[in-house]
Amino acid sequence: MSKMDPRPGAAIGIDRLIALNDEIAALVHAGVPLDRGLTAVGRDTRGRLGHLATRLGERLERGESLDASLEAEGKAVPSFYRSVVAAGVRSGRLASALEGLATYARKFAETRRAIGLALIYPIIVAMLAYVLFLLFVMLLAPRFSSVFATFRFERLGSMTLFDWLHDHPVYWVPVVPALLLLLLAWWVQSGHAAVLRPRRLGGVFRLVPGLGTILMQAQAADFADLLSLMVDNGVSLDEAIVLAADATDSPALRSSAVHLAEGIRRGDSLAALSKESRSLPPMLAWVLSTSTTVGSLAPALKHAAETYRQRAGRGAEMLKTTLPAVLLCVVGAVSAIVFIVAVLHPVLRLWYDLAIPIND
């Protein structure tokens, strides 16, 4: 009897997608029939991944193809993953296609974990600073206002603001906790496999400097790798370009691929078509425009894929190194500015005003 997923159709996480991908690649490498292999994986694996593997195995036993079985899972399996599988099956090199995807998915998961670790300490510092600011507004700011009023000193503009904050805490005290809850919700959402592609990234991810470039480079590597596999295995270039672009889930690459495919079918020059396309990554456009034969295209694409993958790896390493320091500097700078405006400036102004009668 089939295991039933308690939440059928729910999107799987990145780690589960990587695990499923590795299982399928290992079964293909070993020559084990996928239906029996996935059914066995489902029996040995607990949780949502086990349910998913069991359902896939049962569909394969009924004679459905792997890509059709994945399609039947709906949102549980991202559309780009189904496209990668379709491209791998079409090229006859499914294991190689899945290995390329696994490299990209692991790099994304590592970068996501690095961002999470980088956020922990700045968030702790920010929360401590927020608690101190809250105590200042509710306890110390009224004392400053009372002293300035007693001596009839000119009030500072910041003190008017702090008085308003003291009198209306309901409007601002919940803001920071709400932002933290939103950050937590975004973080949970970012663990779904559907965000692996740049167009799926949430707005906060887009604000991380350098992350978009890293993912675009990894995306270009996947495109070049899949296209190389299909060309090397005799898939027609017009069909291979569209399949490879579909696997990247990029609207820009998809548009360029359709334009190139239509031009190839009309008999237009690939070099001219590649130069006209503005959505292709520069190195890919150069490879397509300079490869004179199909035989020279596959190795050139393979080299381009490796180059893009190395660039993405270097960018990810630099991001993991620099992001914690940058975030901590930003939080420290903001905290220092708030401390100067809220505490230091009023104290210095109070000392200055108290000193004037003595000097006179």
Image (spheres, helix red, strand yellow):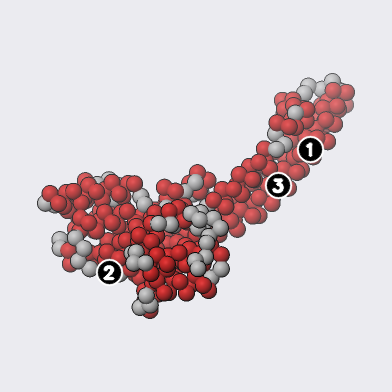
| Disc marking residue 157 | none
Residue in the image at 43% along x and 74% along y: 37
Of marks 1 and 2, the one in the foreground:
2
CA–CA distance between discs 1 and 3? 14 Å
CA gap, disc 1 and disc 2: 67 Å
Residue 132 seen in render: yes
Q: Which residue is mark 1?
A: 136
Q: Is residue 202 above or below residue 82?
A: above
Give whichever of 236, 107 is nearer the camera. Answer: 236
How far separated are the C-alphas under marks 2 and 3?
Answer: 54 Å
Label 1 crowding class (10 Å Cα cut-off): few <14, some 14-19, many 20+?
some
Q: Is residue 284 left or right of residue 133?
A: left
The image quadrant of residue 291 is bottom left
Q: Compared with residue 81, is residue 143 higher up or lower down, i.e. above or below? A: above
> x, y percentage for residue 75?
45, 52
For badge 3, the amino acid type reads: Met
**Disc 2 to disc 3: CB gap under 8 Å:** no
Query: Amino acid under label 2?
Result: Gly
Q: Residue at x 72, y 40 (%)?
A: 339
Query: Which label was assigned to residue 127?
Result: 3
Residue located beneath label 2 in the image: 92
Q: Amino acid at mark 1?
A: Phe
